[in-house]
Amino acid sequence: MKTLTVNCPTCSEPAQWSSENSFRPFCSERCRLIDLGQWADGSYHVPGEIIAIEETGDDTG
């Protein structure tokens, strides 16, 4: 069975799409962390209106 190869969304290097690659769709942990950092700093975002969440003060869970 042939393993599917995709381009890493961060660096465009080939990455194996298989259970053996725990970083898929990325080629490495480094590329996965770069992507996560871009989501965290706001470089990546889902377009749409920002929704304000009201605090209820109820911490009972």
Image (tube, rainbow, N blue to C red):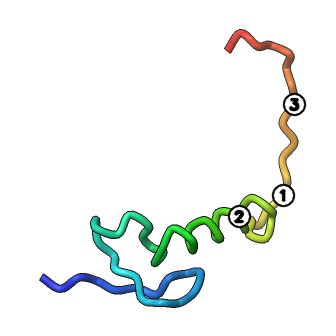
Mark 2 or mark 3: whose residue is earlier in sequence:
2
Please identify, in this view, whether the residue under mark 2 or under mark 3 is nearer the observer. 2
Where residue 4 sits in the image (x, y, percent)?
29, 83
- Outermost residue to the left: 1
Residues marked 2 and 1 touching at CB (< 8 Å): no
Say what amino acid the circle numbered 3 marks: Glu
Rate crowding at label 3 as few (under 14), some (14 to 19) or many (20 or more) other CA atoms within 10 Å. Answer: few
Can you say whether 56 is above or below 19 in the image? Answer: above
For label 2, the SS is helix
Q: Pick whichever, 61 or 4, lies toward us.
A: 4
Say what amino acid the circle numbered 1 marks: Glu
Mark 2 or mark 1: whose residue is earlier in sequence:
2
Residue 37: image tag:
2
Mark 1, residue position: 49
Where residue 36 sits in the image (x, y, percent)?
64, 63
Where residue 3 sits in the image (x, y, percent)?
23, 82
Q: Which residue is at 85% across, 20% downward?
A: 56
Can you say whether 35 is above or below 2 in the image? Answer: above
Tell me where residue 11 sits by quadrant: bottom right
